[in-house]
Amino acid sequence: MPSSGGPTVAGALTEYTVPTLDSGPSGIAVGPDGALWFTEQSGDNIGRITTSGAFLEYPVPTPDSRPTGIAAGSDGALWFTETTSYKIGRIGTTGGILEYALAGLQFPSWINAGPDGALWFTASNEGDFGVIGRISTVGAVTSYSIAGFDGGAVQITTGPDGALWFTNPAYMLATIGQAVLATANLSATPDSGSFRSSISFSGSSFSPDETIKIYSSGVGSAVLATTAADTSGGFEVTVREPQSPFGPRAFLGEGQSSRKLGVASFTVGPRLMLRPASGVPGSTATVQGYGFGAMEPVSVYWNNSFSLLLGRATADIHGSFTGAAAITFTVPAGSPPGPDTLVGRGKFTLADGKAVFTVE
C-alpha cells in the first residue's frame, strides 16, 4: 500500500575495500576537492576516496602515529590528529604533509574546524587532565583545561550558536561540554576561591550602556548578576561564588543587545561549613561540603588529622554534600577547649576542605 506521507526512498549500501589491509579507518571528512579523506589508525596513512570509489593513500611521516580525527581547514587543506605521536598533521589535496608537535599535550583524538578559522581538537595534558586545543592554520597551538574533563577519545564540533561542543565520557559523570569563543573581555578577581567567596568581575569591549548578565555557567543558566556597561562598554560587579565542582571553570558575561560574550576563568576549591561551629564534648553538629569533585566520595576527619573519621558523604553533581547528605557528628569526648580543624578529603581529587570547630 503506498505511503500517504510522500515517496519511499530505497536505500543501498556500497562498500569499498581500503587498499592497505587491516588499516583501521577511523575519522572521515569531506575535502575541498570534493573527495572524502580519512585516517587509517593501524596503517599510519591518510586516505582519499572519490565518490566513485577511487583510492589514494599517503603515509604519515612519523611511524606509529595512529592518525584518528580529520577535518577540512579554512586554508583548503585537511588537518588530522596523531594520537600516539602527539602531533597535529596537515595534508594538502596533492598529498604533501606537514606535522606540528604538541608541547605538553598528549593523545589528541578528534578535530574540527572552528568558527574562527582555526582547528580545534580534544586531547590530554601531561598531567592526564583533559584539554581543548586550538591550532591555527600556521601551526600556532594553544590549549584550555576543562573542568572534569578526562580527555581521550571524545568528539568535538561547532554548534549553530558558534560555540564548540564536545563529548566528555568522564569517569562516573558523562557530560556534554561547551567552549565559547570570547568577543569581549571579562576577568574575575580573585581567580580562585570556594563557595560563597566574593568574586569581582570586570568587563570591557561591550557596547556602551547595554545590560550585562553574568551567568553561572553557559548562556541561559542561572544569572549571578545583572548590571549595566558604562559609556565606554566597561563594568564592574561583585557576586558570591555559586556551588561548583572542584577545579577550573568559566563564568560567562553576555551583552544583552550586542550579544558579545566575555569569559572569565576561575578555579574552585573545596570548603566545609559547620552548624553550629562550637559546642561541648558529646554535643552534635552538622558539616556540609562544597567544591569537591562531582559525585565524589568525601571523608571528614577531626582535628586536622586522618586518624579520627567523623563520617563519609558523596558529593552531588555540583560537588556539594548538603541537606540530607550532610554529615552529623558527635564532638569527641575528652576534647580540650579550643579550636579544632575538621578536614574533608575528596577520594578522587585528593582536595582538602577545612572548617574550624571550637570546643567549649
Image (cartoon, rainbow, N blue to C red):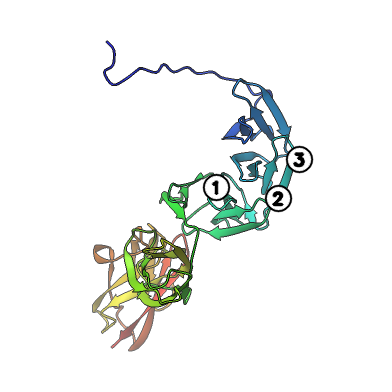
Which badge, 1 or 3, comes first in the chain's sequence?
Answer: 3
Residue contact between numbered discs 3 and 2, judged by CB atoms under 8 Å: no
In the rendering, at what x and y percent does residue 296 appear?
A: 40, 59
The Cα–Cα distance between marks 3 and 2, rounded to whole angstroms, is 12 Å
Which badge, 1 or 2, comes first in the chain's sequence?
Answer: 2
In the rendering, at what x and y percent does residue 87 appear?
A: 68, 48
- Compared with 228, 135 (above or below) is above
Q: Quadrant of the N terminus?
A: top left
What residue is drawn where x is 40% and y is 74%?
A: 229
The Cα–Cα distance between marks 1 and 3, rounded to whole angstroms, is 23 Å
Which of these two is toward me, 134 or 115? 115
Q: Residues within 10 Å of mark 3 (few under 14, many from 20)?
A: few
**Residue 219: mark:** none
The Cα–Cα distance between marks 1 and 2, rounded to whole angstroms, is 19 Å
Q: Quadrant of residue 246?
A: bottom left
The residue that label 3 is drawn on is: 61
- In the image, what residue type sits under mark 1? Gly
What residue is drawn where x is 56% and y is 46%?
A: 113
Q: Quadrant of the C terminus?
A: bottom left
- In the image, what residue type sits under mark 3? Pro
Residue contact between numbered discs 1 and 2, judged by CB atoms under 8 Å: no
Residue contact between numbered discs 1 and 3, judged by CB atoms under 8 Å: no
Disc 1 is placed on an element classified as loop
Left or right of 169? Residue 77 is right
In the rendering, at what x and y percent does residue 129 appear?
A: 54, 57
The residue that label 1 is drawn on is: 152
**Residue 100: mark:** 2
Disc 3 is placed on an element classified as loop
- In the image, what residue type sits under mark 2? Tyr
Residue at the far top in the pictured view: 1
Left or right of 143? Residue 56 is right
Q: Residues within 10 Å of mark 2 (few under 14, many from 20)?
A: some
